[in-house]
Image (cartoon, rainbow, N blue to C red):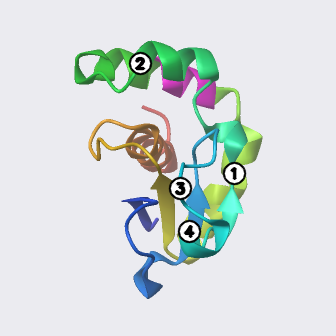
Amino acid sequence: MSIRVKRVYDPPSRHDGHRVLVDRVWPRGVSKEAAQIAQWLRDIAPSTKLRQWFGHDPARWDEFRRRYFRELSGREDALRSLRARARKQTVTLVFGAKDEQHNNAVALKEYLQAKSRGPQ
């Protein structure tokens, strides 16, 4: 699978392939034209409760990932088409957070790649 992550505030590139916004809310200050988003998957974003609890605090990262993965396990139907696309072309998970290492797109990429390898 070819999955990348990228901030929505960084310029789109032809290497991005299929750009998927994975945030529950649209990022501030970015037009839909400028973002060049092919798909917006709100349903696979962390719940509002989880997102607010996390608050992008790196100290909560490991627990955020555990909780988010638990939420994702109930959304396999929504993830199936994303996995299938990533097997055929590059998929870039686009996010709005400032922290490029501790955000839901990074966690989602990890989840998708782990699940593509089979049971753990």
Q: Residues within 10 Å of mark 2 (few under 14, many from 20)?
A: some
Q: Mark 2 or mark 1, which has the lower sequence index?
A: 2
Distance of label 2 from label 3 (alpha carbons): 23 Å
Identify the residue shown where x is 61% and y is 23%: 71
Q: What residue is rendered at 40% in x and 21% in y? A: 55
As drawn, the residue found furthest toward the bottom would be 14
Which residue corresponds to mark 3?
Answer: 29
- Badge 1: residue crowd in 10 Å (few <14, some 14–19, many ≥20): few
Spatial separation of the CA atoms under disc 1 and disc 3: 31 Å
Local crowd size for mark 4, using a 10 Å CA cut-off: few (<14), some (14–19), many (≥20): some
- Residue 29: x and y in percent read 53, 55
SS class, disc 2: helix
| Residue with the mark numbered 1 | 80
**Residue 10 appears left or right of 73:** left
Q: Position of residue 47 (x, y in %)?
A: 63, 24
**Residue at the spot 52% in from the left edge and 78% down from the top edge:** 17
Name the residue at 49% across, 35% down. Answer: 119
